[in-house]
Amino acid sequence: MGIVKISDLMHENLRVAGNALSRSINAQAEHWMRVGMLTEMHPELDYREICQLLIQAELAGGLDIAVAVTTQSAKARGSSTGKH
């Protein structure tokens, strides 16, 4: 765990969104970071599909980027060779 410096405006945005969605500032920041990370890894997915991935990851024990990248690489190799 560490400290992340953010702008005052982003902190206020987190506070407002967190209050609206019944999340702490930290929980809201983590949610946005997870969504952003998955969006960069899967630009073809929309927000609903990203949320489904988050739920699946939670059911599997949590979101682990190392596992996600390995899974994504394996899928890419399978699709490039014609395997599904």
Image (spheres, rainbow, N blue to C red):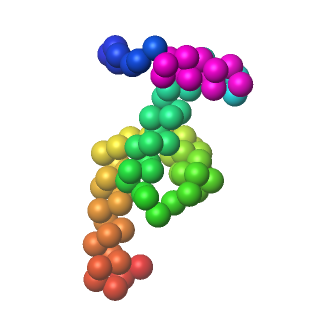
- Where does residue 79 sit, x and y in percent of width and height? 35, 78
At 35% from the left edge and 16% from the top edge, which residue is drawn?
Answer: 5
At 43% from the left edge and 58% from the top edge, which residue is drawn?
Answer: 43
- Where does residue 59 sit, x and y in percent of width and height? 57, 44
- Where does residue 23 sit, x and y in percent of width and height? 64, 22
Tell me if 62 is positioned left or right of 17 in this view. Answer: left
User: Which part of the image, by quadrant, shows the N terminus?
Assistant: top left
Res 77 visible: yes
Does the segment drawn in magenta span residue 69? no
Tell me if 26 is positioned left or right of 23 in this view. Answer: left
Does the segment drawn in magenta span residue 12? yes
Which segment is the magenta one? Answer: 9-20
Q: Quadrant of residue 15?
A: top right
The residue nearer to you, when weighing 57 against 24, is 24
| Above or below: residue 57 compared with residue 20 | below
Farthest bottom residue in view: 82
Give the main secondary structure of the magenta stretch. helix
User: Which part of the image, by quadrant, shows the C terminus?
Assistant: bottom left
- Where does residue 37 sit, x and y in percent of width and height? 40, 43
| Above or below: residue 2 compared with residue 61 | above
At 62% from the left edge and 53% from the top edge, which residue is drawn?
Answer: 48
Q: How many labels sit on residues?
A: 0
| Above or below: residue 67 compared with residue 8 | below
The residue nearer to you, when weighing 72 against 24, is 24
Res 25 visible: no
